[in-house]
Image (tube, rainbow, N blue to C red):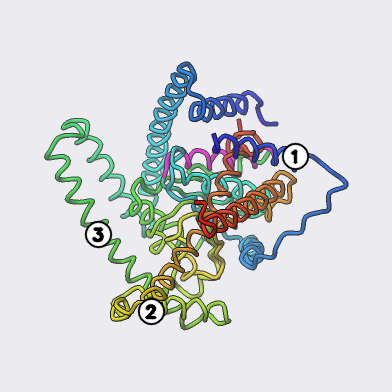
C-alpha cells in the first residue's frame, strides 16, 4: 500500500505543478556544463552539415530500466524539433525492436508536423543488434562515420558502451552521454566530458525544452528527494534511539 | 495533431497493468495478464519488423558500390543462412544451436577483450588530458578506493578500531552509488508517471 500511496501522491504533485500559476516564482534550472556543451555540439553539427547520431540503448519496454530510454526518446523529439533546419535528419540506433520503431516514429512525427516528411530517409532508425555486444558492434559504423558530427548516448547501456564511445581525443568533444546504469556512467565519464549523472538524464528534456510539464517533473523529483532525505533522517534517529 | 484514441488506449492499458499490482481483484488480474501477453507478442513482432528493416538496409548497402559494402554482404548472407537453417532444422536443434553458439561466443568474448583495452586507453587519456580539481579528486578517489578495497589493507583487519575505520571507508563508494541510484529511481518514477498520465507520448498516434 505504501507503493500505491507514493504513486498517488506523486501523480497529485505532478498534476498540481503542471497547472499554470502566476503566483509561483519562475524556476531557474541548475547549470549543467554538459548540457551547455550539447547545445554547442548541436549548433556545430548543423553548421557543418553533418548528421546527429542518437543511441537509445538496449532496454526493452518490459525492462525496469526502460525509463531512461523514454527520457532519451523525449530528448530525441526535442533535439529533432530544434534542428529541423539541419541538412540531415538525426539517425537513431537501439538494441531493441520496439525502441527502434518508436524512435523512427518520433523523428517522423516531428517532420510530419512541419510537412517535411519527404526529408526523412528510409532506415533512419536502426536496430543494430539484439545482444549487448552485437548492439555495440552494429552501432560502430554509424558512430565512427565521417558523416556523423555528434554522437548522443541516452538510454540504458552496460559495459558495452566502452566499445561505443569514440576514444579518439578529437571525437571526445563530439560525444554526449547519459544513462541510468552505473557501469555505463563510469565508462562515459572516463571517455567524455559531456556526461550526465544520475537523475540528470531524466532532467535533460526540461533543459532542452522548457515546457511546464518538464519543469513540473523536476519539481516533483525534488519534492520526492526531500521526502526520501527526511525519511532517512528519521530512520537514523529511530535507530540511534533504539526504536528500530 | 496527435490522436487522442492512441493516447486513451495507452493510458488505459498502463492504468490496468498498474492497478493489477495493487488491487487483488481476479478480473483486473486476468485483464492485466492478457495485456502483458499482448505486449510481449507486439514486442516480438516489433523485433521482427526491426530485423527486416536492418536486413533491408544492409541489402541496399550491399547493392551500392562502396568500400564498406563487403560488411553488408557478410551481414546479409549470415542473416539469410541463419534464417534458412533455423527454419529447416528448428531453433532448438542441437547442431544449429552448437554452430550458432560456437560462432557467437568467441566473437562476443573478443569484443569484451577489446572493451578492456578501449577502457584502459580511455583511462590513460582521462589522466593525461582532463584538468581541474574535480577530475583530480576523481583520479585520487579511484586509486584510494581501489587500494582500500584490495589486499592492501588486509593487515589492518585484525586491529580492532582500525578494522572498523577500514570497513567504514570501504562502504563510502557503496553509499555514493546508492545516492545516484535513488536519484535514478525518482527520475524513473516520474518518467513513468508522465507516460501514464499522457503528458509524454513516445508515439505519434
Left or right of A61 in this view: B112? left
Chain under disc 2 = B
Q: Magenta part of the protein: which range?
A: A96-113
Label 1 vs label 2, nearer the camera: 2
What residue sits 69% from the left and 41% below the top?
Answer: A14
Assign the N terminus of chain B to one quadrant of the image: top right
Instruction: Give the labeled residue for mark 3.
Output: B109
Instruction: Give the labeled residue for mark 1.
Output: A16
C-alpha distance separating marks 3 and 1 = 51 Å
What residue sits 49% from the left and 51% below the top?
Answer: A244
Viewer-side residue, B14 vs B8: B14
Viewer-side residue, B116 vs A78: B116
Assign the C terminus of chain B to one quadrant of the image: top right
Q: How crowded is mark 3: few (under 14 residues within 10 Å), some or many (20 or more)?
A: few
Q: Position of residue B21 (x, y in %)?
A: 48, 30
Asked if the residues shown at circle 2 and circle 3 are in contact, with their CB atoms under 8 angstroms apart, the answer is no
Q: Where is residue A80 in the image (x, y as percent from the top left)?
A: 63, 49
Does A83 sit above or below residue B91? below
Q: How crowded is mark 2: few (under 14 residues within 10 Å), some or many (20 or more)?
A: some
Does A225 sit above or below residue B112? above
Judged by its main secondary structure, the magenta piece is: helix
Amino acid at each position: 500500500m505504501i507503493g500505491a500511496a507514493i504513486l498517488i501522491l506523486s501523480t497529485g504533485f505532478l498534476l498540481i505543478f503542471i497547472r499554470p500559476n502566476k503566483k509561483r516564482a519562475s524556476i531557474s534550472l541548475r547549470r549543467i556544463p554538459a548540457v551547455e556543451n550539447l547545445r554547442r555540439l548541436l549548433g556545430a553539427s548543423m553548421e557543418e552539415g553533418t548528421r546527429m547520431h542518437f543511441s537509445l540503448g538496449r532496454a526493452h519496454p518490459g525492462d525496469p530500466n526502460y525509463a531512461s530510454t523514454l527520457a532519451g526518446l523525449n530528448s530525441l523529439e526535442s533535439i529533432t524539433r530544434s534542428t529541423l533546419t539541419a541538412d540531415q535528419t538525426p539517425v537513431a540506433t537501439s538494441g531493441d525492436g520496439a525502441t527502434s520503431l518508436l524512435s523512427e516514429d518520433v523523428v517522423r512525427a516531428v517532420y510530419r508536423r512541419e510537412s517535411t516528411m519527404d526529408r526523412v530517409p528510409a532506415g533512419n532508425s536502426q536496430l543494430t543488434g539484439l545482444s549487448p555486444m552485437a548492439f555495440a558492434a552494429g552501432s560502430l559504423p554509424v558512430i565512427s562515420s565521417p558523416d556523423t558530427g555528434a554522437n548522443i548516448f541516452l538510454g540504458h547501456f552496460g559495459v558495452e558502451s566502452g566499445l561505443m564511445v569514440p576514444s579518439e581525443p578529437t571525437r571526445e568533444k563530439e560525444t554526449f552521454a547519459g544513462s541510468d546504469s552505473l557501469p555505463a556512467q563510469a565508462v562515459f565519464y572516463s571517455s567524455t566530458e559531456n556526461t550526465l549523472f544520475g537523475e540528470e538524464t531524466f532532467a535533460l528534456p526540461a533543459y532542452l525544452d522548457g515546457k511546464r510539464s518538464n519543469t513540473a517533473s523536476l519539481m516533483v523529483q525534488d519534492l520526492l528527494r526531500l521526502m526520501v532525505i527526511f525519511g532517512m533522517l528519521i530512520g537514523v534517529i529511530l535507530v540511534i534511539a533504539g526504536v528500530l | 495533431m496527435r490522436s487522442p484514441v492512441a493516447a486513451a488506449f495507452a493510458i488505459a492499458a498502463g492504468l490496468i497493468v498498474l492497478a493489477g499490482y495493487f488491487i487483488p481483484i481476479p478480473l483486473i488480474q486476468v485483464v492485466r495478464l492478457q495485456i502483458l501477453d499482448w505486449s510481449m507478442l507486439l514486442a516480438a513482432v516489433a523485433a521482427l519488423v526491426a530485423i527486416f528493416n536492418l536486413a533491408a538496409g544492409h541489402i541496399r548497402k550491399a547493392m551500392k558500390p562502396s568500400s564498406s559494402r563487403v560488411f553488408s554482404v557478410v551481414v546479409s548472407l549470415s542473416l539469410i543462412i541463419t534464417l534458412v537453417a533455423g527454419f529447416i532444422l528448428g531453433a532448438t536443434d542441437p547442431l544449429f544451436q552448437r554452430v550458432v553458439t560456437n560462432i557467437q561466443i568467441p566473437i562476443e568474448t573478443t569484443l569484451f577483450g577489446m572493451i578492456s583495452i578501449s577502457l584502459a586507453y580511455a583511462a590513460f587519456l582521462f589522466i593525461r588530458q582532463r584538468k581541474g580539481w574535480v577530475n583530480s579528486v576523481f583520479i585520487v578517489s579511484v586509486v584510494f578506493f581501489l587500494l582500500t578495497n584490495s589486499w592492501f589493507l588486509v593487515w589492518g583487519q585484525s586491529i580492532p578500531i582500525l578494522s572498523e575505520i577500514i570497513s567504514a571507508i570501504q562502504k563510502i563508494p557503496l553509499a555514493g552509488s546508492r545516492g545516484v541510484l535513488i536519484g535514478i529511481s525518482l527520475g524513473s518514477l516520474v518518467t513513468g508517471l508522465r507516460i501514464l498520465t499522457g503528458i509524454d507520448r513516445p508515439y505519434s498516434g
